Image (cartoon, rainbow, N blue to C red):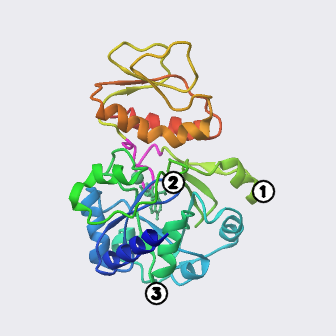
Amino acid sequence: MKSIQSNIKKAKKYLNKNCCIGVPTETVYGLAANAYIDSAVNKIFQLKKRPKTNPLIVHYININSLKKDCIINDNFIKLYKKFSPGPITYILKLRKNSRISKNVTNKGKSLAVRFPKHKILKKLLTELNYPLAAPSANISSRLSAVKASDVKEEFGSKVKFILDGGRCNIGVESTIIKLTENPKILRLGGLNISKIEKVLGRKINIDINPKNKISPGQYPLHYSPGIPLKMNVKKAKNNEAFILIKKRKITLKNYFYLSKKNNLNEAAKNLYSCLRKIKNKGYKSIVVEKISDKGMGSVINDRLVRASKY
Ligand code: TXA
Ligand code: MG
């Protein structure tokens, strides 16, 4: 407990100096900085090698702290009451007098906001008088980080401090819903869409693969393990890493289970660390068995499709 408190103090010290630090969330680790300060936000883009045109998510402790920066609406309030804090990100209209750095949104008029559930990050946010801009803590287009050591692996000593909050519980990023117009899902993620539809009382459009221009939230190349990946494969060659979800009678050295009991939540939680492990073991290619497209299965498949575009 004492060490948590002293780590939070350290995190605060770095953030107050406009540094960028690694922070835990219930979905994936974030690379965080003061969302109100241009130079702090710039450091995130530099470290991640992220195009300036791809805006960041800002993390707030609660609705009260958000109201100064964004215009809220009825759909937001319904969803906030039910699902926040938790793995859902809302796109809202920015207020004209908002203090959010223009660099967060690439001068855009909307802001992605999230209320994380991770205890340690919540504690940190309550002690700060500014929200945290925090994209996933990985080099752009690479695998997301689900442990403090993954963040270290991505950035080495370039990130001065990582607030260690253990392994992320959900293991895939938040679901993104645009609420500035008719609700629209921009990214599949930790919160199931059917739950959102229940609360809003209607079907919601899903717009995760735009045909024409790439807009924020929809960058196709993503989550890449850095080696070729093929999906829906029944059998693997000996030199290929084989990702499985259903227990087989025999287990070979190149078999990597996302879940031993075909549990899709557990599989999602293990996805990024499994891909990272395979890459670090030096495999040159990955094949994945067919994964059901239900519930978290559809999120896993979404990430694998993008990872396969390497
Ligand atoms: O679970 C998560 O959401 C994690 C944790 C750290 O909170 N964060 C995360 O951030 O996944 P990032 O930057 O890797 O993904 C944010 C996505 C990007 O695809 C970005 O294009 C989109 O959100 N986005 C940000 N602002 C947006 C906006 N105003 N309109 C539409 N999409 C936006
Ligand atoms: Mg990301």
In this view, the residue farthest toward the left is: 157
Say what amino acid the circle numbered 3 marks: Asn
Displayed quadrant of residue 40: bottom left
Q: Which residue is mark 1?
A: 201
User: Amino acid type of disc 2?
Assistant: Thr
Between tags 1 and 2, which lies in front? 2
Q: Which residue is mark 3?
A: 97
> Residue at image x 45%, y 84%?
129
Q: Which residue is mark 2?
A: 27
Which one is closest to the eye, mark 2 or mark 3?
Answer: 2
Q: Quick check: marks 1 and 2 in contact, CB under 8 Å?
A: no
Query: Which is more N-terminal, label 3 or label 2?
Result: 2
Q: Position of residue 201 (x, y in %)?
A: 78, 56
User: Residues in magenta?
Assistant: 210-223
Instruction: Please provide percent x and percent y for residue 177.
Output: 58, 58
Asked if disc 2 is less than 8 Å from ligand 1, the answer is yes
